Image: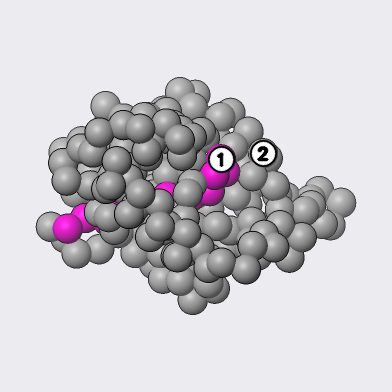
Amino acid sequence: MIPLSPALFVSAANALVAVSGDRVWRGGGASLIHHVGYRSHFDHGAMRSSWPLPQADDCEHLARLAAARGILSTGWPRAGEIVVFWSGMERTFTRAAIIVRAESAEHCHERARVMGASFVECLTIESGGSAGEGTRARLGLERGVRETVRKISCEKEHRFIRWVDLDGRARAADPVPERVRCEERMREARAA
């Protein structure tokens, strides 16, 4: 079986950018996440995938699956993680994207706060584009895959899915819980 690999995940997502305009993705990007994860970890010898997350109907379902497995995080994002975006109006996670690159913690802490919340700027790959508007968007159907620069804030309830942590070899040896480290970073950013 193929070991869990953020590099394979991002590489497979990159291959879909701007070339899959006819493909319809469902669930605010949840179907894109599953497709990329499953195919990037598919072992043709074993005829199965080592992708650890089951298909989710939508982003709220994806976040619940991650929370149940202990991999929903407020920690600093890393390339290859999944971000789920919280909608305060809808009171649910409505979008998901793949983190390609995140700015450094030092750069983020030096920057002024925007809209009353600290944020990290990330390059993401996600479903949607110009064809994802109107009726299709209301139905949760989007065409295409695109790169987007996003300002992501845990203070706005956005969360990261650390799926690679399901492979025991990738676990950090840091005894300080991720939530505590994130809260410390937020306090430092507020003080700056």
Tag 1: Cα neighbours inside 10 Å, few (<14), some, or many (≥20)?
some
Left or right: 102 with respect to 148? right
Above or below, 16 against 1 in this view is above
Q: Does 83 appear in magenta?
A: yes
> In what element is the residue under mark 1?
loop
* Residue type indicated by callout 2: Ala
Q: In the orientation shown, which residue stands out farthest toward the right?
A: 45
Query: Does residue 65 appear in the picture of this structure?
Result: no
The magenta-colored residue range is 78-88
Q: Which residue is pictured at 81% across the width and 48% down the height?
A: 44
Q: In the orientation shown, which residue stands out farthest toward the bottom?
A: 68
Q: Quadrant of the C terminus?
A: top left
Mark 1 lies on residue: 79
User: What count of labels does the image hold?
Assistant: 2
- Give me the C-alpha separation between circle 2 and circle 1: 8 Å
Left or right: 90 with respect to 99? left
